[in-house]
Image (tube, helix red, strand yellow):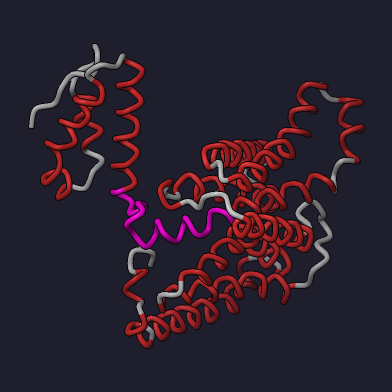
Amino acid sequence: MSTPAIGAAPSAVLRAALQLYPERYRRERGEELVEVFADTTAEGGRLDAARELAGLAVYGLRMRLGLTGATAAGRLLALVAPMLAGAAAGATLVAWATTTYRIDNWLAWEDPYKVYFASFCRPVAAVLLAVAALLGRWTAVRASALALGVVGAYDLVSALRDSSFDLWWSGYIGMASLPFVLAALLLVAAPTDLLPRPAWRRAGLVLASGAVGGLLVGAQSWDDTRFPLDLPWFVLMLLVPLVLTFAGLRGRVAPMAVGVTVLVLTGPGCLFNIWRESGGVSRLLPVAAPTVALLVLAAVAVRRFGRREGAGAVRGVV
């Protein structure tokens, strides 16, 4: 299979992009991909060729990961996207609103520009995320979510570095930042062709998810070292959405989407708080091991008895 040059760049770049596709698909459609690429870039410049090459590579990676509109995982992520966008925006705004009293203190002894960025980057990105989700502007949704994810990843890396990988402090920062890192990754991974168009029903879903996201972050109290909830509540907030994901084993994707969305927001915080209130891993294992075993048995039972009801429809997810 011959590959054309990309402007002044060697055709090896195109071959590298084609390597991202599954081998069978590349064998059957490789020549067609090369011809289409050559036709679409024949009259364009280097920027157009680079854009087409990026699109070709991204779609190949989606196919390799099973995240296209034709897969069950892709359909699940498209269903999760509006809920996750609204929930992430609501969680961010509630967490920020409960800590605004710190801004004046920071401005008194920190670099103002750094404080302004740290204080207002999240709420601005969250507002843009909510508005973009309401309008169905998914490129803007992804950009806003990525901004929140990058800030969250930066906070976590800084906590790991500054605390010399202290588990308590890293977990404390991680439970507040990891949900936004995960949300950004899932929103970027959702297939564009299946993402919903603007509609009143979808807008209502985004708003309701924002309210739920705010309630969840308030219940977990990410910025409060006292953690007002008791251990059983954190276990419940972890197990309920996890059990909801079992619905996917019976071909019911909507409950699974709700479970995935809630797990993204509650999972890191609940895991940290369960570890914290249990007194460490050594005290947690005797309870966690049988719980995990029961969940695995429940998943196997649901999959086995639900196979006739369409479990194969979400085979790509699980």
- How many marks the image carries: the answer is 0
> Does residue 64 belong to the magenta stretch?
yes
**For residue 227, what is the image quadrant?**
bottom right
Q: Is residue 141 left or right of residue 159?
A: left
> Does residue 67 belong to the magenta stretch?
yes
Q: Is residue 233 left or right of residue 46?
A: right
Task: Give me the residue at 66% from left, 58% from top.
Answer: 204
Residue 12 seen by the camera: yes
- Is 85 or 198 nearer to us in this picture? 198
Q: Residue furthest left?
A: 1
Residue 297, compared with residue 178, is above or below; it is below
Q: Is residue 83 left or right of residue 316?
A: right
Task: Give me the residue at 38% from left, 67% from top.
Answer: 318
Q: Residue furthest front?
A: 200
Image: magenta residue range: 63-82
Residue 35 in the image: x percent, y percent?
15, 30
Q: Quadrant for the N terminus, please.
A: top left
Residue 28 in the image: x percent, y percent?
11, 46
Main secondary-structure element of the magenta-colored stretch: helix
**For residue 75, what is the image quadrant?**
bottom left
**For residue 252, what is the image quadrant?**
bottom left
- Is 230 or 149 nearer to us in this picture? 149
Q: Is residue 83 left or right of residue 279?
A: left
- Is 65 or 270 nearer to us in this picture? 65
Residue 26 in the image: x percent, y percent?
16, 43
Task: Give me the residue at 65% from left, 47% from top.
Answer: 177
